[in-house]
Image: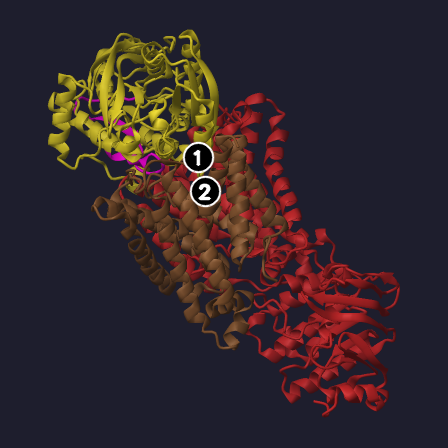
């Protein structure tokens, strides 16, 4: 909190001192670039933080600009503007949020497709702005827009833009430091894991897109009275493209990258376009070089220093609230499940039940459908027939987020954590996902959450307490443990583990088994483990399910299974 | 049939056939390598300049075809080695890097040839009578050649070993590498071939439009929409995509106007990108 | 070329008081150069014209300086790129006003940028706008040398209806304000001349346009003539397609913005029966124009940028500045506006006289002959049709 305040105050001081140092004209020139910088910051948040690239940011700037221009013309000098202008900035944000909800729904890693949709929308918006003469003024633009009442002079332009930029920086730096910001970065790195922590990925991405729309809107709303004119270029592709270039060159991954990139390139362009014929060539080369060799942009060179200066979270740990789960126990029942991937039938009339607390091992030869069982249970694989019940309710087709919220946690075979986030952030996300409401994610104090279970885990694995290390720097074994710890920190009632000891040394394997047993005792939860290693199965399993060719072949204690002739036939040639 | 209706049908066929060939190079590069080469349009532009150079030198126009393909293929080889290869796993970055490249190529063309429009005379002037409709000879020739070319490609793709390897690589690059297909070399060859085809496209369109440094922008977006709508990895998908994008654009332009045609193309592209991003005929 | 490099130190020097002042007040000394800010297309879609615009303005400045400058002050040309978005141009305008204390602006750019500049300058500095436009600019202290629809359309439609006996006309243009305003005037004169519009269509601006469908539609409509208000590459593209379908032999074409570069793109084999009416072609006859062309060639050599209406307009812009300021004996807005009425000044093709802040001027009707314009008729003193009131 203190650091956030100090940081925002420093920005404000710089903004106040700038015109004194540079002179009034430079300040006036910066007024426009500050507005572009606000819009570019939106691009940076989407692309650098949340991992999707918007190529139509100008559309939101333009919509804000036209709405603001129309309001200023219609209600010149009226107090209504105090309401209308903020609404004009909010409207593009709502549009972006709505677009995000429909475009991101049911899709992971939309990649270039999302970018191209926004590009096409931007082209469409240009045609509308250019053609709808009666409202937008067509090609010549919406002209004669009055300035903001009482602030209608060159010298005021800087202060309005600077104030807006300062507020935007303060707000976005708050957000990016808040749990919400951690969540965005998590979405960029691993959407699947985010969903399996119980967060709504679609909503999260739509919210970031909405926020970037608001930033575009703010830029547009202030642009109209500053320039007294809004033309179709403001919604078009060229500005959208420039915003992306500025964000990329400055550094998309940080808050200041897009802002510095916009101001630097903007000022250089203004100074050089009339004197240096090859400026555009140089800019194209700079852009290529940044994309190819310096994806973190100019700010990237300063990042290691900034990282070192970043203060540790202060203040005493706070107890995270206990997880509240709807009733219904932890029993799983598959009833006549069929599923296929392309032409291949993976699950074929599978009926099984896991209705005891304790450890159930799911075994079977390769291709038996073990991992598909997990995928189907957690809504990643659609069922062609049959039903799934969990905790007393039908959950067939419920997506990962919903399944997770009912108390299922899943650990994947390949460690599935957030490599770019710190260990503490990884663990925090697990705590928040299971316990925090959406609006809690704006509260900085959630960073200090802890739980008794986590403290006990940290005692067993001291590296979990070294919160500042990046998860990506951990060893393979440590990442396996981290993911297991995240799953346990959620305090689920059913834990799905897919080969939890794969790739671990005997020593590490032993410790993982130890933790699994401890967790079963400590949380009284049901655990289903996919395992190939029969010695591990013998050591862990209370009960064993054998799958073969998408059907349940046998179920029972380890001794019963070993005695089963059908199982022996499948495993002919001995167990692995 | 009313000669005008015949003409509009030929226009639609012309739109589809030329778009299929213009998008072909892009389809190879995007389908095989996952690289969305934004500079594809600028390679079309380079091909068109090659055609202009050949014609200005008084050489036969047909000579422009190998020359443009060679020049653009060479450019493609340089681009692949210098810019694309290290970025294969980063789709946004290839998009942005080739975008930067497109700016650079435009500026380079401007520095060499200036911004003025170059006029390339039709190598085959005049019109021929098709069912009572007088249709430009050169456009008719393009329709026939493009369709024949795409059909030949489809046949080759279905039969030859290279076609099989390519299909394997589109479906699963890692597996393809595992079974011994040299994906690195195949990728380079594919990129070079894609660029050479862009050059061919440039030679095709040069006599129809003004040749100038910014002409490439006109082709990149529609070509990409073709891939989105048709889906990657099959010739049928390419033809379907060109049919829908080129056909819809031409059809709506014919019955309404160009603004409606352009809007229809943008809207259909958005719908496909949103609801069916793998296209109509994507390989599973 | 005289050009002041813009330094950071220069910015600091830009005074705060002047920035905030509602009117730029200055007492010029005779030794100070007279600064003209030239807004031209150094970049962007119209950059093709940039070199000609710059060269023409520089030629005018050189000639004026040789003859004693403006009010005894040497003229200095400050170049400003107007090819970017309007907001960039307004920013440059503020810099030129505040920091360079520019005396006057000459602009050759699109109308969106003009609207932006008018809104920013707010009559503090005289502003002369020079290329073809749609009419209607009457902002105070703004002077428009551009061809208006009235000036272009009346002679063109006269030719079509009276001499070529055209009855049915098809209109095609880009979808923005200039083509629509121009076509309004076309319809008005056509109706008066006994003709009618039998088809009208617009294609989007800045989109990848093809014209096969439109040309087929025109073929079906069988007009006697097509009036074209397409610009740039679309204009080239349409005319090539039109001729490719063989329609060039069947009907007339009258283009409203067809200059030398566009005609080169259209190509000699596609320009049959193509007419055009503007105030400038590089082939306009007369002693004044010959002198201009000789001076242009002497200054810029064989490789001089292509002469065309958009470009050469800047020559008239600078000469208009001289005449205006010298007649008003200063740069006070009210004096300038009063002086502009009846003001006579030089253009590349000879003197013109300003009324209602728009000049009456000779218009030339040209027929394309290959990639050249053959002037077939001259209309003297065509009024702009604009009625800007004196302030």
Q: Examine the rendered structure and indicate whether residue B107 appears above or below residue A562.
A: above
Residue C298 placed where, x, y %? 11, 31
Q: Which residues are magenta?
A: C26-51
Comparing A532 with B183, the one in front is B183
Residue at the bottom extreme, as displayed: A574
The subunit letter for the residue under badge 2 reads B
Residue drawn 48% across and 21% down? C199
**Residue A475 visible, this orientation:** yes
- Element carrying mark 2: helix
Residue C71 placed where, x, y %? 18, 18
Comparing C114 with A461, the one in front is C114
Q: Which residue is mark 1?
A: C212
Q: Examine the rendered structure and indicate whether residue C54 appears above or below residue A9.
A: above
Residue B98 placed where, x, y %? 41, 55
**Do tag 2 and tag 1 residues touch (Cβ < 8 Å)?**
yes
Q: Is residue C45 magenta?
A: yes
Q: Examine the rendered structure and indicate whether residue C220 appears above or below residue A551.
A: above
Chain coloured yellow: C
Comparing A245 with C154, the one in front is C154
Q: Which residue is mark 2?
A: B14
Comparing A335 with C120, the one in front is A335
Chain B colour in the picture: brown
Say left or right for A170 vs B47: right
Quadrant the C terminus of chain A occupies: bottom right
Chain A colour in the picture: red
Rendered image: mark on residue A463? none
Quadrant the N terminus of chain A occupies: bottom right
- Element carrying mark 1: helix
Q: CA distance from mark 2 to mark 1?
A: 9 Å
Q: Examine the rendered structure and indicate whether residue A227 appears above or below residue B161.
A: above
Local crowd size for mark 2, using a 10 Å CA cut-off: few (<14), some (14–19), many (≥20): many
């Amino acid at each position: 909190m203190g650091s956030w305040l100090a940081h925002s105050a420093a920005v404000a001081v710089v903004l106040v001192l700038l015109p004194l140092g540079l002179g009034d004209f430079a300040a006036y020139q910066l007024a426009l670039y500050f507005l572009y910088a606000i819009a570019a910051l939106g691009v940076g948040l989407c692309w650098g933080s949340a991992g999707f690239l918007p190529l139509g940011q100008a559309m939101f700037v333009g919509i804000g600009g036209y709405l603001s221009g129309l309001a200023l013309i219609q209600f010149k000098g009226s107090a209504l503007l105090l309401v209308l202008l903020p609404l004009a900035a909010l409207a593009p944000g709502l549009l972006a949020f709505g677009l995000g909800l429909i475009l991101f729904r049911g899709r992971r890693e939309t990649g270039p497709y999302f970018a191209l949709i926004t590009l096409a929308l931007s082209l469409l918006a240009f045609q509308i702005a250019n053609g709808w003469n009666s409202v937008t003024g067509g090609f010549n633009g919406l002209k004669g827009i009055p300035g903001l009442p009482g602030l209608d002079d060159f010298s005021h332009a800087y202060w309005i833009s600077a104030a807006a930029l300062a507020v935007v920086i303060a707000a976005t730096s708050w957000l990016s430091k808040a749990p919400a910001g951690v969540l965005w970065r998590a979405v960029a790195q691993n959407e699947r894991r985010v969903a399996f922590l119980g967060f709504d990925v679609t909503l999260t991405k739509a919210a970031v897109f909405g926020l970037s729309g608001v930033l575009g809107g703010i830029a547009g709303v202030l642009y109209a009275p500053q320039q007294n004119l809004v033309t179709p270029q403001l919604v078009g592709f060229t500005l959208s493209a420039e915003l992306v270039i500025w964000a990329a060159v400055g550094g998309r991954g940080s808050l200041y990258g897009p802002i510095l990139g916009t101001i630097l390139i903007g000022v250089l362009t203004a100074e050089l376009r009339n004197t240096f014929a090859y400026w555009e060539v140089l800019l194209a080369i700079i852009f290529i070089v940044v994309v190819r060799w310096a994806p973190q942009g100019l700010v990237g060179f300063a990042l290691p220093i900034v990282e070192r200066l970043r203060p540790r979270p202060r203040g005493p740990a706070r107890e995270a609230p206990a997880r509240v789960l709807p009733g219904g126990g932890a029993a799983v029942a598959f009833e006549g499940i069929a599923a296929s991937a392309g032409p291949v039938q993976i699950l074929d009339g599978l009926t099984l039940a896991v209705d005891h607390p304790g450890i159930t091992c799911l075994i079977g030869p390769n291709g038996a459908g073990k991992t598909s069982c997990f995928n189907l249970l957690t809504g990643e694989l659609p069922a062609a027939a049959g039903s799934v019940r969990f905790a007393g309710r039908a959950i067939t087709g419920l997506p990962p987020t919903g399944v997770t919220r009912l108390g299922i946690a899943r650990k994947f075979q390949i460690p599935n954590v957030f490599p770019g986030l710190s260990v503490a952030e990884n663990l925090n996300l697990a705590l928040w996902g299971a316990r925090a409401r959406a609006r809690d994610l704006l509260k900085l104090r959630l960073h200090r959450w802890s739980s008794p279970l986590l403290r006990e885990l940290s005692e067993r694995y001291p590296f979990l307490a070294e919160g500042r290390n990046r998860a990506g720097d951990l060893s393979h074994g440590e990442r396996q443990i981290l993911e297991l710890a995240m799953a346990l920190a959620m305090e689920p009632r059913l834990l799905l583990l897919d080969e939890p000891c794969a790739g671990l040394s005997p020593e590490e394997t032993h410790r993982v088994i130890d933790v699994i047993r401890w967790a079963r005792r400590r949380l009284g939860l049901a655990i289903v483990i996919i395992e190939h290693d029969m010695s591990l199965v013998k050591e862990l399993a209370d009960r064993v399910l054998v799958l073969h060719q998408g059907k349940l072949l046998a179920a029972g204690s380890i001794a019963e299974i070993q005695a089963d002739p059908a199982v022996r036939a499948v495993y002919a040639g001995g167990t692995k | 049939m009313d000669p005008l209706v015949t003409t509009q049908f030929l226009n639609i066929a012309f739109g589809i056939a030329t778009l299929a060939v213009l998008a072909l190079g892009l389809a190879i590069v995007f389908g095989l390598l996952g690289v969305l080469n934004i500079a594809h349009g600028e390679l079309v532009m380079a091909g068109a300049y090659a055609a202009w150079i050949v014609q200005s030198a008084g050489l036969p126009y047909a000579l422009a075809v190998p020359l443009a393909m060679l020049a653009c293929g060479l450019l493609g080889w340089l681009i692949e080695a210098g810019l694309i290869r290290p970025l294969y796993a980063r789709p946004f970055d290839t998009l942005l890097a080739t975008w930067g490249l497109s700016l650079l190529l435009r500026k380079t063309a401007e520095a060499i040839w200036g911004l003025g429009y170059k006029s390339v005379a039709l190598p085959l002037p005049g019109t021929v009578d098709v069912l009572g409709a007088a249709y430009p000879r050169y456009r008719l020739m393009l329709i026939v050649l493009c369709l024949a070319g795409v059909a030949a490609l489809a046949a080759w793709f279905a039969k030859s070993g290279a076609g099989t390897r390519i299909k394997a690589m589109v479906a699963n690059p890692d597996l393809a590498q595992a079974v011994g297909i040299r994906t690195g070399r195949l990728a380079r060859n594919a990129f070079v071939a894609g660029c050479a085809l862009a050059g061919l496209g440039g030679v095709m369109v040069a006599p129809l439009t003004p040749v100038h440094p910014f002409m490439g922008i006109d082709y990149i977006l529609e070509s990409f929409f073709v891939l989105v709508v048709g889906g990657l990895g099959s010739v049928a998908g390419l033809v379907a995509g060109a049919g829908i994008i080129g056909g819809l654009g031409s059809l709506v332009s014919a019955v309404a106007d160009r603004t409606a045609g352009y809007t229809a193309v943008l809207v259909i592209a958005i719908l496909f990108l949103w609801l069916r991003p793998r296209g109509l005929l994507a390989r599973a | 070329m005289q050009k002041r490099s813009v330094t950071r130190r220069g910015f600091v020097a830009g005074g705060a008081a002047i920035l905030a002042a509602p009117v730029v007040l200055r007492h010029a000394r005779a030794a100070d150069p007279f600064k003209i800010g030239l807004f031209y297309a150094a970049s962007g879609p119209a950059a093709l014209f940039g070199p000609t615009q710059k060269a023409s303005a520089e030629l005018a400045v050189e000639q004026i300086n040789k003859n004693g400058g403006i009010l005894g002050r040497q003229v200095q040309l400050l170049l400003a790129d107007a090819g970017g978005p309007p907001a960039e141009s307004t920013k440059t305008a503020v810099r030129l006003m505040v920091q360079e204390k520019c005396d006057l602006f000459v602009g050759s750019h699109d109308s969106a940028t003009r609207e932006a500049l008018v809104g920013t300058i707010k009559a503090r500095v005289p502003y002369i706008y020079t290329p073809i436009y749609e009419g209607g600019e009457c902002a105070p202290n703004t002077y428009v040398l551009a061809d208006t629809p009235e000036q272009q359309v009346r002679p063109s439609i006269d030719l079509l209806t009276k001499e070529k006996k055209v009855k049915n006309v098809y209109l095609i243009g880009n979808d923005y304000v200039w083509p629509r305003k121009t076509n309004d005037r076309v319809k008005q004169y056509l109706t008066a001349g006994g003709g009618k519009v039998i088809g009208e269509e617009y294609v989007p601006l800045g989109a990848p346009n093809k014209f096969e469908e439109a040309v087929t539609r025109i073929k079906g409509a069988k007009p006697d003539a097509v009036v074209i208000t397409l610009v740039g590459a679309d204009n080239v593209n349409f005319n090539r397609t039109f001729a490719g379908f063989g329609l060039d032999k069947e009907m007339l074409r009258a283009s409203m913005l067809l200059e030398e570069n566009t005609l080169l793109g259209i190509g000699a084999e596609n320009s049959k029966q193509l007419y055009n009416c503007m105030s400038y072609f590089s082939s306009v006859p007369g002693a004044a124009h010959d002198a201009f062309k000789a001076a242009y060639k002497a200054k810029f050599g064989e490789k001089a940028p292509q002469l065309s209406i958009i470009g050469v307009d800047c020559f008239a812009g600078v000469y208009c500045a001289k005449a205006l300021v010298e007649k008003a004996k200063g740069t006070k807005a009210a004096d300038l506006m009063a002086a502009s009425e009846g003001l006579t000044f030089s253009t590349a093709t000879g003197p013109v006289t300003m009324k209602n802040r728009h000049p009456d001027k000779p218009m030339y009707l040209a027929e394309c002959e290959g990639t050249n314009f053959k002037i077939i008729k001259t209309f003297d003193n065509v009024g702009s049709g604009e009625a800007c009131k004196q302030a």
